Amino acid sequence: MLELLFLLLPVAAASGWLVARKGLARRAAAGGEPDPAYFRGLNYLLNEQPDKAIDAFCRLIEVNSETVETHLALGNLFRRRGEVDRAIRVHQNLVARGNLSAEQRGYALLELGEDYLRAGLFDRAENLFRELVELGLHQRRALIGLREIFEQEKEWEECLHVARELSSLTGEVMGPEIAHYHCELAEEARRKGDAEAAWSHLREAQMTDEHCVRASLLEGQIEMERGDLPAAAKCLRKAERQDPAYLSEIFPVLLLIYRRLGDREAMIDELMKLYRRREDPLVMQAVAELIREDQGPAAAATFVAEHLKHHPDLAGMERLLSLGVELSADEGVWCNRLDLLLQATRQLLEKRPAYQCHHCGFAARRLHWQCPSCKHWGSVKQVPSNGSVNWGSSSNRAG
Ligand SMILES: [Zn+2]
């Protein structure tokens, strides 16, 4: 029977049973026989009877506190398999024991907190994580758990406190995250009409992270609402210098401001400068439209063709085809064929994700300041203009 167990152990170890084996090995080294209840529990588990296995292991711990590691491994195995209720039963059973050392109890509380977090029982998870922070046990993981709870509950002030605690505890640079929390608070204040509070949070965001595009964008929007268009344009130009990977958010607003300002010559001058600096398809499209309005479709087509020579992208093809349809309006068959190509190109453009997370590869059609997949802040950015998408992992989907 013992041989059979050790034959089976490598299989089990692969799913989190390594710790159990360590415990058994220690007992064997000490000359003790593993408790028969172990075999029963393991058998139930291997026979896909997890609830009976839990009962067997829970009875076992009353006899022997050396099996704590095994219970922790078992609970983690259940949680990883998405069986959170079972993980909670195992970890609750551990926490209820009075014979655990402080270290063992700390581990059990942490794991139970993670179970509650996964199950969406935020109040319970928060209490456990706070207890751990107060006890000085597993503080980093407990603070990360607390931050996740407050982010999901959109408790941004709490997020700020936790991020600062984490930063002072671990020395981790949390500037970008803290800046995003301030931006969230600024958006809340803006929605409530409290402009002063909004400005104060945006200043804090910029001071914490000088590259915070989101704060510059928000400043620009508030300036627009106040009717100060030159000040708004200044904020957006700053955002563009901070990170051109957000140009698809910045540029449409900037274009709107230039059009509202009504100085066409200045607008063309600004757009041409921006185009030479970034050669981005969005800016190319706007410049092409201005050329079309002023000089007609043939001049615009020449400009777009020049862009395509250096930057073969779908947006450039779409614009050139669109101008081609306009130019060949009198040549029935060719016009129809070009129009067919134009529609096909537009469909390809629509299918393409506009944004992608640089951290996990998550693809999205709209901007998320926090990646919905890996929860990183500021990692979802515009897909490069040539449309190449780096699919980071197979689980990515458009969101
Ligand atoms: Zn991500």
Image (cartoon, grey):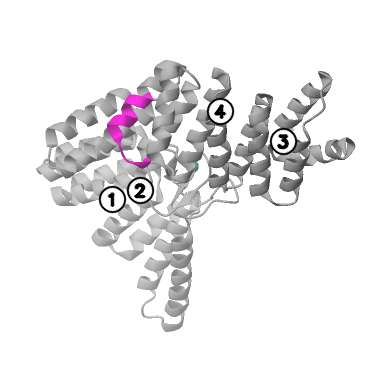
Quadrant assignment, res 328: bottom left
Element at badge 3? helix
Magenta stretch?
152-163
Q: Please name the amino acid that badge 3 sits on.
A: Trp
Label located before the other in sequence (3 or 2): 3
Rendering coords of residue 35 (x, y %):
77, 32
Q: Is residue 273 above or below residue 22?
A: below
- Tell me the residue that label 1 is attached to: 252
Three-letter code for the amino acid on which mark 1 is drawn:
Pro
Mark 1 is surrounded, within 10 Å at the Cα level, by few (under 14), some (14 to 19) or many (20 or more) other residues, namely some
Q: Depth check: 317 or 9 in front? A: 9
Q: Is residue 307 visible?
A: yes
Q: Is residue 379 magenta?
A: no
- Which amino acid type is marked by label 2? Ser
Q: Secondary structure at mark 4?
A: loop
Give yes or no for contact between labels 1 and 2 (Cβ–Cβ under 8 Å).
yes
Residue shown at 13% from the left, 45% from the top? 225
* Mark 2 secondary-structure assignment: helix
How far apart are the two marked residues, 3 and 2, measured between alpha carbons? Answer: 49 Å
Identified at 71% across, 29% down, the residue is 19
Q: Horizontal and vertical percent for residue 39?
A: 78, 39
Q: Earlier in the sequence, mark 4 or mark 1?
A: 4
Task: Give the residue at mark 3.
Answer: 17
Classed neighbour count for the residue bearing mark 4: other residues with Cα under 10 Å, few (<14), some (14–19), many (≥20): few
